[in-house]
Each structure stands twice: as C-alpha cells, then as structure tokens.
Amino acid sequence: MSLTIAVPRGALLGDTLDLLDRLGVDTAEVRANDRKLLFEDAGLVTMRPSDVPTYVEAGAADLGITGKDVLAEHPERDVYELLDLGFGPCRMVFATVAGEDRAAEALRRLGVMRVATKYPRIAAAYFERTGRQAEIVEVKGSVELAPLTGLVHGIVDLTATGTTLRENGLEVREEIAASTARLIANPVAHKLKAAAIDDVVARIRGAA
Amino acid sequence: MIHRIPSGTRDVLPDELRELRAITEGMRAVMDGRGYGEVATPALEYEEVLVRGDAAAADPAYKLFDEHGEVLALRSDMTIPIARVVASRYPTADVPLRFCYFQHAYRSVQPQRGQPREFLQAGIELVGAPGPEGTAEALTVLCEALEAAGLENWRVGLGDASLYPRLLDRVGVPEGARAQILHELVTRDYVGLAREVEAFGAPELLELPQRRGAAGILDFPEADGLAALHELLEPRVAERMIFDLGLSRPLSYYTGAVFEVYDAALGAPLGGGGRYDDLLGRFGRPLPACGWALDVERIHAARVGEGR
C-alpha cells in the first residue's frame, strides 16, 4: 500500500531526503526542484515544517516529518508520534540582551516581563510552570529584533548553534526544551495502513 | 443582509438534509429491527447530574443558570443522559434494555480547527448485557448500521481499556509512574512512552500498544478478554475488526472493550464506543453496559469521499 509522506522544507529537508533515500524513495525530483510542492510518483508533499501536523492530522498525508518544537506548540493535533529521528537537533531557549538581565529587572520592578516568540503556547506554559508572570507577544518574523528595539524584555526561540542569537547581542539565559525531528502518523492511516507504516518504522530503525 | 451564526455551528439546507436523512433512516431501520427503541432526552441537563457520570466526560462546555440559580449544561454525549434515564425511568425493569438515539451533542472547539460545537450523534446503548456477549451484539449492530449508512471502506478498531493497566500490574510498575505513562499512551506519543517505560526493563510496555491487526496478535494473558470476544463474532463482523492493543478513548468511563470506526476516505474516526460496566452504578442502578455513537456528519463526509 502506498503512503503519502509530508516532507518539511527548510533546515530539516536535507536530512529528511537522505533518510528517504535510505528507505528507497526516489527523492531526485525533490532535490532538483525548489518550487514544486507535490511529487505524486514518489508519494511526497513538501511544506513548511509547521504545516506538517496539519496535513497529517487531516489525512492529506499518512506520515510526516517535523520538529518536536512544532508538535509541542500544537499538542491538540491528533497524530501519532512514532519515532525520534535524531536529526535536526536544536534547543528552545529563553534569551535576553547580553549583559544585565532586563527581563529579571522587569519582573522585579514591573511584576511582569514581555516576551516575544513564534511559540506562544510553549512560552506561556514555561513561564506559568516556573511561576513567573509574562506577557507573550507573538511575532512572525525575526524574533531577535524584538528585544533590541525595546518591544520586549526577552525572547523564547529555537536555536541550533546559538550563532544568530550571539550575532544580535543576545544571551541564552535558560534552556526550555531540546528538540529533534519526529516521524508522525495520521491516526486513521495508522490503523488502515498498519503494515506499510510499521514497515517504514522498522526500516528507519534498521537504517539508524 | 447577512446575519452571523456562532463559529462551529451551521445551517443545514434541504440538499444536505435529504442526504443526512437517508443515512439516519437506514441506521434507524437496523436499530429498530434489532429491538433498540429510540429515545430523546433534553439537550439541557443539570450539571451536577452530568458530572456524576464522569467529570471529564461531562466536561460541559456550555453552562447557564436557570431562573432558580441552578446550573444547567448542554450535554456533551448521550451515554450519560441515558444512564440517568435507566436509573430514573426504569428502576426495576427487566434487562437487557436496548435504546437508540439520533440527537445533537455539544462540545467546545479550538479556534481555526473547523470543529463543530453542535454535532449529530447516532448510537445505541445496551444496558444489562455483560461482556463478551453484550459487546458482540453491540459490534454486530454497529457493522449493520455502517452498512445501512451506505459506507463500504470502513473498519472497526477494537481494543480493551483494561489491557494496559493490567500489563502495568504484571510488570510491577509503581502507582506513582503510571499517570505519566498513561498520558503518553493517550496522547499517542510513542517517543514519550519509550522514555517513560525504559526504566522498567519490559519491552512489551512499548511494543504491545503498537500492535494492531488480525486476531493473531492476541497471544498474551492480558488479551484474554479480546480473544473471548473474537470467538463470539460472526465472520462478517470479525472480518471488519482491526485488533488494536494501544487503542484508547478520551472518556474515562470505559472499563473493557473499546472501539473506534475508521473509513479510508476520512482522516478522523467516524465514532466509537465501548463497555462501561461501572457507569450505571454511579446513577444507582448498577448494571453492565456498552454502546457506541457515530458522528452522522462525518459518515456523510466519508460517503462523499468514497464517491457515493
């Protein structure tokens, strides 16, 4: 039975295609084509990593590969998380402008700090869990800009090496969670295409 | 002039309602033929009555005060109202009791997810018939109802809510570790489950709930209930089953067999059900019971998806 797999474009794309190659999926067309999105012969669809759970939950793809950060931000998505694929390691961190910690000062003097992020649910849950009052400001673009302009006192963002943060004069204060790429499955496909999905899982385990 | 209606609600116009009606009439004929009498109960109940059934299941999303200051809630399923009906209206009646219903239920929605606040459920309750015979009857009626609804490519996932807790007993997992393990199972996170069970040196804690398929997977002690049930199923029913040792349902009142209905044309289950042998006791008439509910609008969507 053929499976449709949602493939993340961006930082996870290279490792994902290497993995699919090892499974015997023909990824040459994806590698050769930046603009095309749907590769019916290979059973692949490409999209932003944050869209992968949306497609998989709805059954538009049977399997998908995306970061744990995306899954943690959208726990309401009804998908199976089958495997930790190990690649794409990064950390969700709380960072502020280097030097004196302005967020700590805001907390002490104002009682609340403002935090910019693309991950409002992870950020809100983290500060609630650690007993601090935070106003979460959701931004779509470069989060690093927000504390430099005075929009916020700190940011919650994903970082692989920390280079971008450092280059913008930001300092990691706390690590919230580690993330790697995960294999996810649609809950109906997980039953109706059980053999095909178990075969993919076994081959990935074998290839690792 | 355009007037708004709440998100997650909708008007049903004649073309759609005609098709929905064809589905519900087909199912009603099956239930009627099997001796399931149709009941209707109020959409509004006292909150305290719903919560008696199951705090999580009742979890009424819509509450209001009546003119005496009592809290009313819109029902979120039909199982708890029917448990109330059995205890209140049939306190001494002979069992088994067979009921069916075609009623709306109400749940809260998350934004931007296309979820309905109000949805039409078709279902049965079989009260006073213990498992596995009662469960086999409910599954047989389920299969006949799905056929009468005009679907072809459907299967029923069949699991057992008591299976994994019993496995935890056998392995000797301490009480304190269980809530997190069960959380990983219910949220379908096998990466998290692997992490939580690693310390117990029992690979079956991770491996068994991922097993699903034909009855051949029922070859260990905790699957005895499912194996006994399988023995009782007619071939035309048994061939539709996918045994699923990790199947869990969101409601906590299930005590034994649980099931979920899938159609290849839809990415989400059409409905489900199971055994709840403790629920009626909470309303004062302790009786074993089981039942199921199907989402009529999802059946319709699956029919359209199947090209029918």
Image: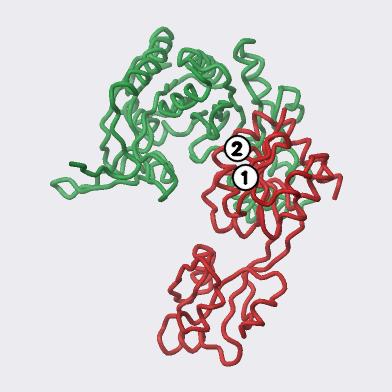
**Do residues under tags 2 and 1 come within 8 Å of each other at their CB atoms?**
yes
Who's the residue at 77% across and 27% down the image? B219
Residue type marked 1: Arg
Q: Residue B32 appears at what percent x and percent y? A: 38, 10
For mark 1, give the secondary structure. loop
Residue type marked 2: Pro
Residue furthest to the left: B67
Q: Residue B306 appears at what percent x and percent y? A: 53, 21
Please tell me the colour of chain A: red
- Residue under circle 2? A187
Who's the residue at 29% across and 40% down the image? B74
Who's the residue at 48% across and 39% down the image? B251
Residue B273 visible in the displayed image: yes
Q: Which mark is residue B188?
A: 1
Mark 2 surroundings within 10 Å by alpha-carbon count, few (fewer than 14), some (14 through 19), many (20 or more): many
Q: Quadrant of the N terminus of chain A?
A: top right
Compared across the picture, whether A113 is left or right of A100 comes to left
